[in-house]
Amino acid sequence: MPAVRHPLDPLSADEIRAAAAAVRREHATADSWRFAVIDLHEPAKDELTADTEPPRLAEIVCWNRADGRAFKGTVALAKDRVASWDELASGEHPSMTVADYHEADEVLRRHPAVIEALAKRGVTDMELVLIDVWAYGAAVAPPQYAHRRIGWADVWHRTTPDGNPYANPLAGLHPIVDLNTMELLELEDDWDPTHPTAPPVMGEYAPQLVPGLKLRDDVKPLAITQPAGASFTLDGNELRWQNWSMRLGFNYREGLVLHLVGYEDDGKLRPVAHRMSFAEMVVPYRDPSPDHYRRTAFDIGEWGLGHMTTSLALGCDCLGEIAYLDATLFNAIGEPVEIKNAVCIHEEDDGVLWKHVDHVLGADTRRMRRLVISFHATVANYEYLVYWRFQQDGSIQCEVRATGIMITTPFTGAKPPYGTVVDTDTYAPFHQHFIVARLDLDVDGAGHNTVVSTESEPLPVSDENPHGLALTQRSTPLQFESDGVQDYDWHRQRAWKVINESSQNRLGSPVSYKLEPGAAIPSFLPTDSPVLQRARAIEHTLWVTPYAPDERWPCGEFPNQSLDDRGLPVWTAQNRPIQDTDIVLWYVFGINHIPRPEDWPVMPVDVVSFWLKPIGFFDRNPALDVPPQPGHRHG
Ligand SMILES: [Cu+2]
């Protein structure tokens, strides 16, 4: 096997093959075994800084379809052996796989009961049908199947072979399937001959299928050229640009991971973040009707943003001088799978960085440039586009764009209260997209970070404040995990600074980076809601934990068919100290998606973001050294 360049580099295709082979040799000998996880066991922080290279370990989750037993293990790649092997606890189910999804569609489309149910609705060409399987939460799964690995499905019907499969649901028809045996357990069918199936709507977005659509003819070429090439360097997985440096990782679950993010300041590399990624996504549909009550997607924990990542295309997804990174993942039978052009790296012009017009000297302007690292995931009907942007002033912006096709349902009679009418007798249910970002910040190092809640506080009118103008800034250090559970507060403009008391700027203040909350949304879920029980992480905007390498998944390691959240609420119940130590921030943000007619039939991007900004991390504006545009004065 070729030498590993860095201990954080993702598993290679050879390593994936070797890990699967070791498991097949020692434990999973029958053909009925499937892999849900073959991933790098990332070395912990102290292992990365030790004198000796950490051992290369692969994490495995696999199960035997023949009896349903599931195991978690590690493979020591240098020794070519399985180092640990433990059966999953009761109620823990491996994640869904791409193979589950495709196999369920293929098998159910050919099932006589499904064919019969579709024939009643006038659908006889099974090639036009898509059976789209979703994962269950335990509280809404039929109890008689609780011990099985199961899914429930929507049935969709496209009007033409090249039509949008998600344009027309066959509402009221839902197969429940055993994903190990691919047995149809139940076919929920509310067919009523007195209520014929709704006629198809015009849910097409491809121009040739949209009646009467004429493409605009006034869009002139807009070319991005960088005649001298890009200003970043990508060496293996190590990326450097404009004082920033980092290592790019990628895994089946989080997709892109940013490791070892640092900023070179006055010749010294200063750490900002050890690791940043999206650790969970929770998408509850807020419609209690039979078609939607169990529709809650954990796109990261159940399906994996990495597995859902699609190849990017130059000129469409990214413009300019692009570097792409391929991703190597695995399939359910343990073979490597390559996603070409999974991650895009490029620079963008971002308008003005700073400017002043002096009445004597004239204008001095600097243009801003940003480095963008992005990947796109297609989760069945929906797309998530993820952008991490690094700026010349030391700021980091994390942006998500949601697009794709909304789930819709036909209705008769009164307008449904839990959605928006987007087409003839068709509505799109209200739903939410919660994303939990795991931000392992190391501001000027790992050991001495504290999160400080900052709030703006107006003082009452008094003798010292006769005009009621006095505004103070209240800073409260968060000492224990119970303090670290924080909510967004518009009235106080609450934000959170990560300070390092052991590192001071020239003004004598501890250096810091601030998490500026953007797109924080309340869960709007009652405490006793089964969805909230599985995803208590989304109950608050921020959680802070002391760094623990095994604490990775905020709604638990196994959210598929879960009953309760075994992640953040369990860890933070220990109420560990979080002051002046190595800490991890868990930031919950997203979209409260109240659909618009304009979101149909394909949704223009809905854009949300949050920022990490240096606050006294530098002694002054760190972008004074950005040169002016060639040919402009003051150059
Ligand atoms: Cu949405």
Image: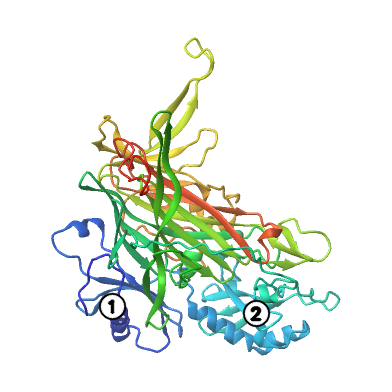
Q: Inspect the image, locate mark 1, and give the three-letter code of the amino acid beneath it.
A: Glu
Classed neighbour count for the residue bearing mark 2: other residues with Cα under 10 Å, few (<14), some (14–19), many (≥20): few
Decide: few, some or many residues near mark 1? Use Cα within 10 Å; few <14, some 14-19, many ≥20: many
In this view of the protein, which residue sits in the foreground, 547 or 565? 547
Give percent across and percent down for residue 1.
Answer: 22, 80
Can residue 563 be seen here? The reply is yes
- What is the number of callouts on the image? 2
Q: Tag 2, which secondary structure?
A: strand
Q: State which mark lies toward you, 2 or 1.
A: 1
- The colour scheme used to paint the residues is rainbow
Q: Quadrant of residue 22?
A: bottom left
Q: Quadrant of the C terminus?
A: top left
From where the camera sits, is residue 571 visible?
no
Report if the CB atoms under discs 2 and 1 are less than 8 Å apart.
Answer: no
Checking the image for residue 186, the label placed there is 2
* Amino acid residing under circle 2: Glu
Q: Residue at x 27, y 64 (%)?
A: 8
Return the residue found at the far right: 194
Q: Is residue 94 left or right of residue 415?
A: left
| Vertical arrangement, residue 285 with respect to residue 34, above or below | above
Residue for badge 1:
15
**Secondary structure state at the residue bearing disc 1:** helix
Q: Residue at x 79, y 76 (%)?
A: 197
Up/down of 158 relative to 290, above or below: below
Percent x, y for residue 169?
A: 70, 73
**Residue 624: x, y in percent?**
32, 40
Q: Earlier in the sequence, mark 2 or mark 1?
A: 1
Q: Position of residue 191 (x, y in %)?
A: 77, 77
